[in-house]
Amino acid sequence: MRKRLASLAVAGLVGAALVALPQSPAAAAPSKELSDGIKRQLAAGIQVVPKQQGTLKAPANAVNPYTALLKDPSKVDKYYWSEVAKQQAAARANLKKNSLTAAATSPLLHDEAEPRGTFGSNDSHATAELVKGFGTAKKLNNRARVLGQLSPETVSPTTVSAPAEDNGAIPIASDLLLGAGRRGISTSGDIGDGPHGSAGDDTGDFDFIKVTALAGQQLLAGTDTPSGPLDTVIGLYDATGELVGTDDDGGPGLDSLLDFTFTTSGTYYLLISGFGTGTVFPADPFDSGSGLGSGSEGPYLLTATLAFPDRDFYAVDLLAGDVLGGSVTGVGTRLTVRDPSGRIVFGSEQDASFIYAPSSPLPGGGNAVVSQVAATTGRFTVEVGGNAGLYDITLEAYRPGPEAQDNGTVQTLFLDFDGARINTAIFGGPGVRTLSPLAGFLGKWGLSAADENKVINEVIAAVKENIITDMKERGTDPRFGLKILNSRDNPDPFGQPNVHRIVVGGTIAESGIDTIGIAQFIDPGNYATEDSAIVLLDVLSDPSGAASLNTYITPASNKIKFIGRALGNVITHEAGHLYGNFHTDPLNSTPNLMDAGGAFPGLFGVGPDNIGGTADDFDYDFGDDEFFPNEGLVGVEDTLNTAAWGLTKGKAK
């Protein structure tokens, strides 16, 4: 998966102390140095578990990381899931294409106004070309095709000799005059041939190349490994040693392709490394001997160019609540949506539409796919980026799914505490399983059967506050509505129209799914109103562990209040997926109910004293937060209004 990330985000993640580290139960804990290397690697969006290669076959206990709340996200094989996404998203796009009827409105066509072979006229949010006639209002067409051409500055690489070793650190980086006389280079190298490779002291071989860049230039750096076993990783450091960009597997197969646009002129350093667990980046980029062991090794070819890119922006007028979907084919490899203020709200270099509900009308099947729920009425822009040549963008806008229902129709969220017989295949599990009830786990938290009603009361209160109270008070949907029912107080309504179910109970062994919680889909606009999620309770009630509530319970805890709030937050997280939200970054400074797993106790609301159920506990809410970088998305996600507009009370009068 391709990755581009800001240096501040990298620094913040590396400094976090709550990153889960991968190890088998029988394995010894990694050394502090290797643990730090693993943290650096995860912070940069690079997986640490071995990659599946060859035939695409699900690894043991493979759980969809997009819809699951994982105890340890570091164990995800991102390479495998990126391949799954490509295959399943393409299949979904074909089904959607074949299901379109002849009566469907033909999309309007918008040809780029910027003359072909030039750039500069529609290269910003402020100068975006308006796609006239597009929208969800009457007399507008909600489907459009945008045809255009990217015409970046042309650069021909110069072939240069392989740089000499040792070039494993910033002070001794090879100077191939990239950006200082040469706008592009083609060269070769070998990871492992330096004094620190496996044939040397085995601390790890890194190749650094100096880059002199101007603000606005785009660096494209790609590797080719046709004759060897090397699995490359590319990094980009600034002159202070901050890691500002990375890529792993952005090219064909396991080859890398870094696409980075500079915002500040200066000297930078390109790193070529070999994939490994905690060994991808040096501990100190100024010290060539600071690696933590050799990873993948072998020869590579490198092509790197510096050129001013062609950035094409298109404006679309959206109404509050509109659900915008976009997909690009041709040379386009990146789509970025900005809100009326110019803020990036959804950026993608992948197609993750396989996690949409089958009934979702949103497009997919392209090189990059985006979705965005408009929190306010205004002019949004869609930017396309990529290589030189022709692109074809599909844009579609829809009103939220519940607006197809009669006026006043309200979505129901049913919380099932009694256990359930459920087909876990809908989550990628083994099939029909029986999940045990909440009551079976109370003793593991030191509670009795007499406490069950009190816990359920706290859970319901937390879910209502997280969704109903906050969305009514802070959301932009004036017609928001949600009914929350539960198995203690209400007959089971699941199977009736407009009822979502979340089963709160069961274990990993019972379900066959290695997760804390998982939702059936991520559904921007809520087009599938009768789906399920589960919240398993074995990890949450383990005697200890970062993801166990018991870790944060002491005699000072209001135990029932804490357990109820924590379970309510996890339940809300899974409901958030059903209402269209992706994961947000769990390790930045912004708390959000959609934060991905692996950084507990944050989602449980534990405060600075690290004890749950005390006065300093934090109220996690929906709101604005950055996407989780490990899932290949960038921008600020408005998790509150994405969900709120998916819960509109039927068709407006």
Image: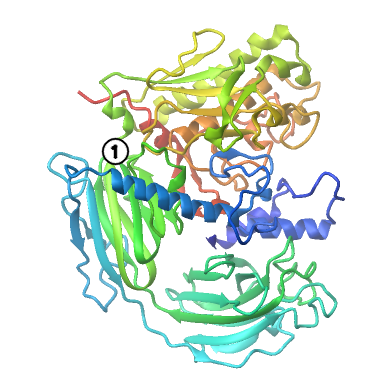
Q: Residue furthest front?
A: 55
Q: Is residue 457 above or below residue 26?
A: above
Q: Residue at x 21, y 56 (%)?
A: 131
The answer to whether 501 appears left or right of 117 in the picture is: right
Q: Is residue 7 above or below residue 137?
A: below
Q: Residue furthest left?
A: 139
Q: Position of residue 522 (x, y in %)?
A: 46, 39
Q: Quadrant of the C terminus?
A: top left
User: Which image quadrant for residue 37?
Assistant: bottom right
Residue 579 at least partly seen: yes
User: Which image quadrant for residue 386?
Assistant: bottom left
Q: Is residue 475 above or below residue 389?
A: above
> In the rendered structure, which amino acid carries the disc numbered 1?
Ala
Q: Position of residue 428 (x, y in %)?
A: 57, 38
Q: Dot 1 corresponds to which residue?
A: 320
* Residue closer to the observer: 396 or 560: 396
Q: Residues within 10 Å of mark 1 (few under 14, many from 20)?
A: some
Q: Residue at x 28, y 71 (%)?
A: 149
Q: Position of residue 427 (x, y in %)?
A: 55, 35
Q: Position of residue 284 (x, y in %)?
A: 74, 70
